[in-house]
Image: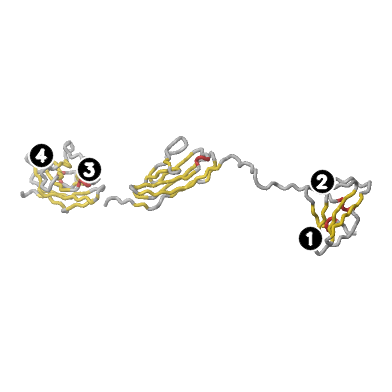
């Protein structure tokens, strides 16, 4: 009828789930408006509409799914501005919306046939992983120290990070801090022992996708390493006094062209009274040199040597 008109700036309002939507609206009426009511139609004809907003805050028959989410852009109803804003949009908010205006008298009421249409676009949040898990921390520690490992991953939304050791899940204990978190998780193991050595795995999960990263941790014992019992033993060398060789008659011993004959064999384990026996190989012949020791000479001390000791002739015999 004449005098009652409602205007929507747009035939369809499009908005994304989780955001807000404004339904622009203005109306005219033959009576002074007191309250504005908005309905959401269950069908195109709006046979059984649900009240989603009433300017009378004392009204309690508001559809539960919209209560607290719908409000007037202009609270002063006298301005005849019927625009509303719907917050935190849901998929079920899509549909047709109808306006009703009430005045001071019970006769002053009008429902407008024109409807506003709200279309919610479902631009579902896509899970985006920008990096794989990264682990930082000490991998070589000693007994009694604290193991501190941090696993982090950049993802939208944040990934759930869980720690495990040797493929076994880790849970908080008196020695282990809470290892699970979102975005970043720090694992701390106090007073470690050699038994805490092993492979520590960080798993970052978002929906059905899991990325893993691992580090091998080694805990060294504070006890000293045992003394080695195998292997070559240290050689012990004996000091041998060759001063008695000076008492052998001075004789030049010619060096043979054969370099293998330039050595003398001294048998120090033979003792014949006051004599010193010396076997000399010279020019392919072996000679037995025996020198008597004078009475006033100091009695030599011979060391028992299991194997003969060899020395160069030049070092043992002085030239005459």
Q: Is residue 249 above or below residue 187?
A: below
Can you identify the residue that label 4 sits on?
A: 104
Task: Please give the label number shown on residue 260.
Answer: 1
In the rendered image, residue 220, in percent from the top left (x then y), is placed at 55, 43
Q: Is residue 276 rendered to the left or right of residue 185?
A: right
Q: Label 1 neighbourhood size at 10 Å, few (<14), some (14-19), many (20+)?
A: few
What element does badge 4 sit on? loop
Judge depth for marks 2 and 4 and give the one in front: 2
Q: Label 3 neighbourhood size at 10 Å, few (<14), some (14-19), many (20+)?
A: some
Can you identify the residue that label 2 sits on?
A: 303
Q: Earlier in the sequence, mark 4 or mark 3?
A: 3
Q: Label 2 neighbourhood size at 10 Å, few (<14), some (14-19), many (20+)?
A: few
Q: Earlier in the sequence, mark 2 or mark 4?
A: 4
In the rendered image, residue 289, in percent from the top left (x then y), is placed at 88, 54
Which residue of the protein is positioned furthest toward the front in this rendering?
Answer: 285
Q: Earlier in the sequence, mark 3 or mark 1?
A: 3
Q: CA distance from mark 1 to mark 2?
A: 26 Å
Q: CA distance from mark 4 to mark 3?
A: 26 Å
Q: Is residue 172 rendered to the left or right of residue 122?
A: right
Which residue of the protein is positioned furthest toward the top in this rendering?
Answer: 174
Q: Quadrant of residue 315?
A: bottom right
Q: Are marks 4 and 1 in contact (CB under 8 Å)?
A: no
Judge depth for marks 2 and 3 and give the one in front: 2
What element does badge 3 sit on? loop
Judge depth for marks 4 and 3 and give the one in front: 3
Can you identify the residue that label 3 sits on?
A: 69
What element does badge 1 sit on? helix
Judge depth for marks 3 and 1 and give the one in front: 1
């Amino acid at each position: 009828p004449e005098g009652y008109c409602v205007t929507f700036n747009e035939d369809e309002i499009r908005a994304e789930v989780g955001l807000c939507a404004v339904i622009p609206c203005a109306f005219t009426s033959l009576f002074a408006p007191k309250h504005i009511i908005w309905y959401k139609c269950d069908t195109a004809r709006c046979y059984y509409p649900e009240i989603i907003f009433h300017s009378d805050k004392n009204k309690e028959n508001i559809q539960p799914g919209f209560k607290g989410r719908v409000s007037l852009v202009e609270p002063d109803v006298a301005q005849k501005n019927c625009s509303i804003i719907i917050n935190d949009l849901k998929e079920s908010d899509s549909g047709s919306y109808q306006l009703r205006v009430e005045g001071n008298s019970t006769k002053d009421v009008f429902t407008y046939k024109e409807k506003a249409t709200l279309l919610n676009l479902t631009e579902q949040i896509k899970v985006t992983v920008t990096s794989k898990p990264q682990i930082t921390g000490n991998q070589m520690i000693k007994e009694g120290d604290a193991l501190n490992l941090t696993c982090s991953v950049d993802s939208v939304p944040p990934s759930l990070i869980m720690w495990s050791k040797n493929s076994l899940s880790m849970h908080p204990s008196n020695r282990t801090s809470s290892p699970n978190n979102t975005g970043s998780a720090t694992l701390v193991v106090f007073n470690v022992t050699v038994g805490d050595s092993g492979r520590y795995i960080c798993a970052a999960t978002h929906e059905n996708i899991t990325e893993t990263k691992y580090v091998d941790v080694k805990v060294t014992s504070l006890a000293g390493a045992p003394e080695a019992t195998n292997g070559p033993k240290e050689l012990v060398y004996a000091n041998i006094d060759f001063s008695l060789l000076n008492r052998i008659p001075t004789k030049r011993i010619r060096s043979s062209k054969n370099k293998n004959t330039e050595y003398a064999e001294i048998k120090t384990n033979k003792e014949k009274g006051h004599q010193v026996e010396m076997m000399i190989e010279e020019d392919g012949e072996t000679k037995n040199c025996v020198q008597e020791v004078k009475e006033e000479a100091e009695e030599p001390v011979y060391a028992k040597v299991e194997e003969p000791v060899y020395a160069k002739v030049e070092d043992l015999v002085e030239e005459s």
